Image (cartoon, rainbow, N blue to C red):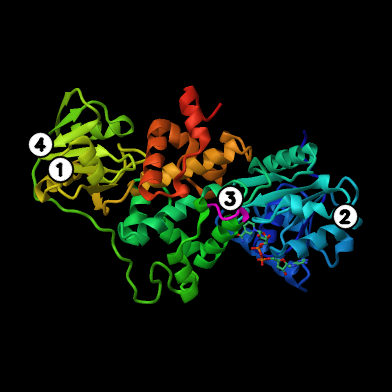
Amino acid sequence: MVALPETARIAVIGAGAMGAGIAQVAAQAGHEVQLYDNRPGAAVRAIDGIAWQLGRLVEKGKLEGATRDAILSRLRPAVSLDALAEVSLVIEAIVEDLAVKGALFAQLEALCAPDCILASNTSSLSITALAAGLERPERLAGLHFFNPAPLMALVEVVSGLATDAAVVETLLATARRWGKRPVRTRSTPGFIVNRVARPFYAESLRLLQEGAASCASLDALLREAGGFRMGAFELTDLIGQDINYAVTCSVFNAYHGDPRFRPSLIQKELVDAGRLGRKSGQGFYDYREGATRPAPTELESAATVDGCVLEGDLGVARSLVQRLRATGIAVTERAGSGLLRVGDAVLALSDGRLASERARQEGLRNLVLFDLALDYGTASRLAISWAADTTPLARDQAVALLRHAGLKVTPIRDLPGLPVLRTVAMLANEAADAVLHQVASAADVDLALCAGVNYPLGPLAWAEAIGLGLVLTTLENLQRSYGEDRYRPSLLLRRTLAEGGRLHE
Ligand code: NAI
C-alpha cells in the first residue's frame, strides 16, 4: 500500500502539545497542514511555537532557513472545521474524552470526503468505541504518536474492530514516509507501549514498598546495570506521578482489575500529597532549591581477593568471568552448576528465589546472589543480596571480587528476584502476553518499546538473550513466593520453551 502523497492535505485537530508536534511532523514531510483548535488563538499560538522551535534549529545550523520558511508556509491555522473539507487525513489530538472525541468524529464524517481517513492520537481510549458511532467506522484508526512527536520515532497504528486493512496500510506507509517507525497494534487497553511498559514502574514501586533499597539505589541499578536511560522513580517524577498513576489505573480498570496492572499505593500516596514530581517541586525526589539528590548505596570491602573458582557455566553472566580475568583475577574452572566461589562466599545469578530459601534448598553456605545486567562486560553497577546465614566476611569477599572487576555493588534486601532480573522478566512476560493475545507481532512489540520508551533491548529479544528458561523460572519463583497471580507466566513463554522455538519468528 502506498503512502499519502506529499500533495495530500492533512488536518490536525487540537493544537496542544501533541497536535502542534504532529502538525510539525506532517508539514516537515511536505504536506499542507491545517491546524484547528476550538480555543480561539490556540492554533496561531501553536504555529508560533513551531516557528520558534524551527528557528532554534536554524540558529544551531541544523536546519536551512529556506527549509524552515517552506515548512512554516505549509502550516495554516483553520478558523472552523468547515475549512477542512478538502483534506485526505484528519488527525485528532483533542482532550482525552470519549464523548467529546466521538462528537468531533461524527461532525468530521459529515464534512470530509468519503475517502478521507480519520485518525485519533488517543493514548487510552478504544478505537473500536470511537468508531462505533460513525456511519463508516472502517475509515477510523488510531495514530498514536509519542511526546514530543517531532523527536520520538514511534507511532502506533491502531486498528479497531471495524478498521479497514487498507486504511492501516496507508497510515503505516505514510508514517514511514514521515520518517517514523510505525508498528501495528490492535485496539486493546494501553495498545503496546502503555501496556507492556507498566512493569517497569510497577516492579520498582513494589521493591521500594518492600524496603528493598532506596529510590536512588533502585534507579541507579536500572540505569547502570539494566542499561535503561532512567530509573522508574526519576522517570515518573519527570512524567508526573499523577499522569503515570492515571495511566496505570486506566489500564488496570480496562483489564477488569487484572492484578498484573494493580496500581501502587505508594504512588497514590504521592499523588494524594500533591508530590507530582518535577513539576510540583517534589516527588520521589526533592527538586526544591537547595535540595540535594541522595546517592545510591554502595558497599565497600576490606577483603582482598586474587582468585576465584568458576563451577560450570554462568550462562548469561558469562562475560563477568572474562571481566574478572581481564582485571587480573585468577579464575580456576571446574564442573558444576553455574557458581562462582571466592573465599567463603558462593555467588550465583538470581533466579527469583529468596537467597535464604535457595541457600537452604541447594545446601549452599554463604550464598550471595547477584542481579542481571544488560551487559556484564560494561555494566558499572550490580545488585547483590545474601542469605540470612551468610557471614559478613563471605559477603565482603563477594563484594571485593565484584569491586575488583570495577563494579559498584549495591545491596538489596533479600526479596524474590533482584531488581533488573525481576523488571526484565516482567516486561518480557507482558510483551509475551501481548503477542499471545494477537495485539501485535513480537517484532513490533520490541520495536515499540525501543523506539517509544528507549529501552536498550526489546523485552522479547532480551528474554531470548537471557534464556527463556531463566525468565520462566524467575516468574514461577516470584509467583510462588508471593502467591500472587500478578506474576503468572505467559503461556507464550512456556509454549515457546517447550517447543524449543523462538519468540521472534
Ligand atoms: P493538550 O491539553 O495539550 O491539548 C489539547 C488541545 O485540544 C487543547 O488545545 C484544546 O483547546 C483542544 N481541544 C479540546 N477539545 C477540543 C475540541 N472539541 N475541538 C477542538 N479542539 C479541542 O493535550 P495533549 O497532551 O496534546 O493531548 C491530546 C491528545 O493526545 C489526547 O488524546 C492525549 O491522550 C493524546 N496523547 C498525549 C500524549 C502526551 O504525552 N501529552 C502522548 C500521546 C497521546
Reading the chain from its start, which is encountered first: label 4 or label 1? 4
Q: Mark 3 points at which residue?
A: 152
Query: Label 4 vs label 1: CA separation?
Result: 19 Å
The residue most toward the front is: 483
Does dot 2 land on a helix, a strand or a loop? Answer: helix
Residue identifier under label 2: 109
Give me the C-alpha separation between circle 1 and circle 2. Answer: 70 Å
Query: What kind of residue is marked 3?
Result: Met
Residue in the picture at 57% in, 52% down: 194
- Which residue corresponds to mark 4? 306
Q: What residue type is labelled 2?
A: Glu
Proximity of marks 3 and 2: CB atoms separated by less than 8 Å: no
Q: Is residue 238 magenta?
A: no
- Helix, strand or loop at mark 4: loop
Tell me the crowding category of disc 2: few under 14, some 14 to 19, or many 20 or more residues within 10 angstroms, Cα based. many
Residue 132 image position (x, y, % from top left): 81, 52
N-term-proximal mark, 1 vs 2: 2
Could you say where residue 300 lies in the image, as x and y percent from the top left? 16, 53
Front position among marks 2 and 4: 2
Q: Nearer the viewer, mark 3 or mark 4?
A: 4
**Residue hosting label 1:** 366
To which quarter of the image does residue 166 belong?
Answer: top right
Residue 320, image x, y percentages: 26, 35
Q: Distance between the residues labelled 1 and 3?
A: 47 Å
Magenta stretch? Answer: 254-258
Left or right of residue 494: residue 422: left
